[in-house]
Image (cartoon, rainbow, N blue to C red):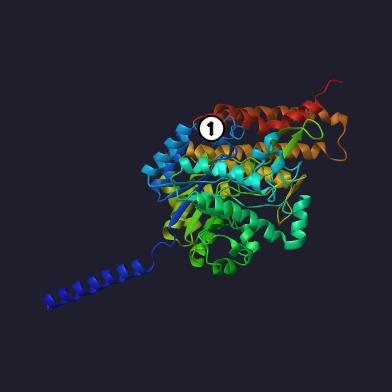
């Protein structure tokens, strides 16, 4: 009887192992491409920081990095395009080789339609512009010029990147049909034809180089029938940062087109800036979109991480002479977002909905040694009053004053300083610093609200000036904290520029009110 029982147990155990193996084989991870997008339009990471970040990603299963080099790529044939922070060719080659050793494919992203201010700002490329005041987009009818330029750029990128892919951008082409010639073609054939004809030209260049074109899918979703004119090997990346799945268009039509699709949530995106990070929004984006992409049958998933909105403010010396273009929105550097990187990696490796509260508790326990109560306090502090302030008004569903948001954020900062991590203390300092930056910002907004009140008079100026002096001292402390935490992550001149940018409004207001009588 005993031997028979043992035999039954062994048979049952074997059946369980077989069933588990069958289930595992029946449900492999749906994403062949597990990617991360690094945006170097501003906040250019040092090469050591880039390599350290790639190592972190590889250890968590990431096999692809999409590099938006922009002005940091050292184009030789077009030397006006690289900026002051451009890497050398040897540095680029070293990074790509380093990633290859980690089994990471590095895909270059070269914007080739919209978001090309950094190219079109130069007089040499003025004939490429769709608009002579808005330098964000090339004219799709300058076919010979555009084809020659992007053939040059793609050829250089192909020479240094062994990847089979080149990402050509193609998103947010808001100026379609703006130029007079384009306007005529759009009226006759439609904006979709204007877009697709040009994108096809770019795809053909990439294919002739032996590469596969990749592009953002927002326009493709808008014009699902027109995209059938593109080469069948084209790959689309559907980016969704927390909105309705059909925000850009019908996903079923996109899937029915037969093209390979990858999905893309965001770790930093609008309205994030230095003064606001909507942590809960990004966690929910990961929780909801990753499994949705898996269900739709997407073959890849790529986390985007935007350092800026991609919109720029042009400064003119005269009516026609450009002096500079400035990125409108800056966010906190990628150095402060390890928790979201890890959340994304956990989500894609199981390809199921992320349990946010469980993840936060586990992360805080493993990284900082927090118990459940401490973890809950940490999470509550991160997501406290995550509202924009616009023109002196809090953008919240329930009525809130700036003072109320300020007080709540101060309380959150107190909580973060009361929590004492056992490990990874530098990482934890980023949360404190980001919250401290927000407190200073809200303090300025509160001061501005008082200064702009109908009853504000000259007699009140001394009091406001004292508040501004106190704020500037606090900003100086934050600047030192920011520089210390990010000194190995960004270039020294970038750290100074970022500090100056954050404090600009405070200084300008103080100078204006403290003028000599």
Viewer-proximal residue, 60 or 338?
60
Q: Is residue 371 above or below residue 501?
A: below
Q: Quadrant of the C terminus?
A: top right
- Image x and y of residue 502, in percent: 66, 34
Q: Quadrant of the N terminus?
A: bottom left
- Residue 374 visible in the shown view: no
Q: Is residue 280 above or below residue 93?
A: below
- Horizontally, is 7 left or right of 261 in the view? left
Toward which corner of the image does residue 19 lie, by quadrant? bottom left
- Residue 492 visible in the shown view: yes
Which residue reaches farthest top? 516
Q: What residue lies at 63% left-to-right and 27% top-to-bottom? A: 476
Dot 1 crowding, Cα within 10 Å, few <14, some 14–19, many 20+: many
Viewer-proximal residue, 375 or 396?
396
> Circle 1 is placed at which residue position?
490
Number of numbered discs: 1
- Image x and y of residue 350, in percent: 42, 60
SS under mark 1: loop
Viewer-proximal residue, 278 or 217?
217
Q: What residue lies at 72% left-to-right and 51% top-to-bottom? A: 175
- Horizontally, is 418 left or right of 125 in the view? left
- Image x and y of residue 505, in percent: 73, 33
- Image x and y of residue 269, in percent: 61, 49
Which residue reaches farthest front? 144
């Amino acid at each position: 009887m005993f031997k028979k029982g043992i035999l039954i147990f062994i048979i049952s155990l074997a059946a369980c192992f077989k069933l588990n193996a069958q289930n595992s084989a029946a449900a492999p991870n749906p994403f062949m491409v597990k990617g991360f997008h690094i945006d170097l339009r501003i906040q250019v990471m040092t090469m050591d920081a880039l390599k350290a970040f790639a190592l972190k990603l590889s250890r968590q299963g990431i096999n692809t990095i999409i590099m938006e080099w922009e002005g940091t790529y050292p184009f030789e044939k077009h030397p006006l395009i690289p900026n002051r922070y451009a890497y050398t060719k040897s540095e680029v080659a070293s990074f790509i080789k380093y990633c290859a050793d980690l089994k990471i494919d590095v895909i270059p992203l070269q914007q080739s339609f919209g978001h090309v201010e950094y190219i079109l700002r130069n007089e040499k490329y003025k004939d490429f512009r769709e608009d002579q005041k808005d330098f964000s987009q090339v004219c799709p009818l300058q076919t010979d010029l555009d084809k020659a330029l992007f053939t040059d750029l793609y050829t250089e990128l192909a020479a240094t990147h062994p990847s089979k892919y080149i990402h050509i951008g193609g998103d947010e082409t808001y100026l379609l049909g703006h130029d007079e010639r384009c306007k005529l073609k759009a009226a006759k054939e439609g904006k979709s034809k204007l877009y697709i004809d040009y994108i096809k030209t770019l795809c053909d260049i990439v294919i002739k180089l032996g590469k596969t074109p990749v592009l953002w899918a927002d326009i493709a979703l808008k014009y699902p029938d027109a995209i059938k004119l593109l080469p069948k090997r084209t790959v689309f990346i559907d980016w969704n940062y927390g909105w309705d799945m059909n925000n850009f268009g019908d996903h079923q039509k996109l899937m029915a087109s037969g093209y390979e699709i990858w999905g893309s949530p965001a770790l930093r995106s609008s309205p994030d800036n230095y003064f606001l990070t909507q942590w809960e929004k990004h966690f929910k984006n990961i929780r909801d979109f990753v499994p949705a992409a898996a269900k739709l049958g997407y073959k890849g998933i790529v986390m985007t991480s935007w350092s800026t909105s991609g919109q720029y403010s042009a400064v003119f010396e005269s009516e026609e002479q450009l002096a500079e273009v400035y990125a409108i929105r800056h966010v906190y550097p990628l150095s402060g977002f390890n928790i979201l990187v890890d959340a994304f990696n956990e989500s894609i490796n199981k390809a199921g909905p992320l349990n946010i509260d469980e993840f936060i508790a586990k992360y805080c326990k493993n990284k900082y040694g927090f118990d459940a109560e401490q973890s809950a306090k940490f999470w509550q502090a991160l997501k406290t009053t995550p509202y924009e302030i616009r023109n002196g008004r809090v953008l919240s569903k329930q009525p809130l004053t700036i003072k109320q948001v300020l007080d709540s954020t101060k309380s959150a900062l107190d909580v973060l300083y009361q929590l004492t991590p056992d490990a990874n203390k530098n990482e934890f300092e980023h949360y404190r610093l980001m919250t401290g930056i927000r407190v200073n910002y809200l303090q300025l907004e509160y001061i501005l609200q008082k200064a702009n009140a109908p009853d504000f008079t000259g007699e009140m100026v001394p009091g406001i000036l004292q508040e501004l002096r106190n704020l500037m001292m606090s900003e100086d402390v934050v600047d030192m904290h920011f520089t210390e935490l990010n000194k190995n992550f960004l270039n020294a001149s970038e750290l100074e520029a970022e500090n100056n940018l954050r404090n600009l409004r405070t200084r300008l207001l103080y100078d204006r009110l403290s003028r000599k009588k």
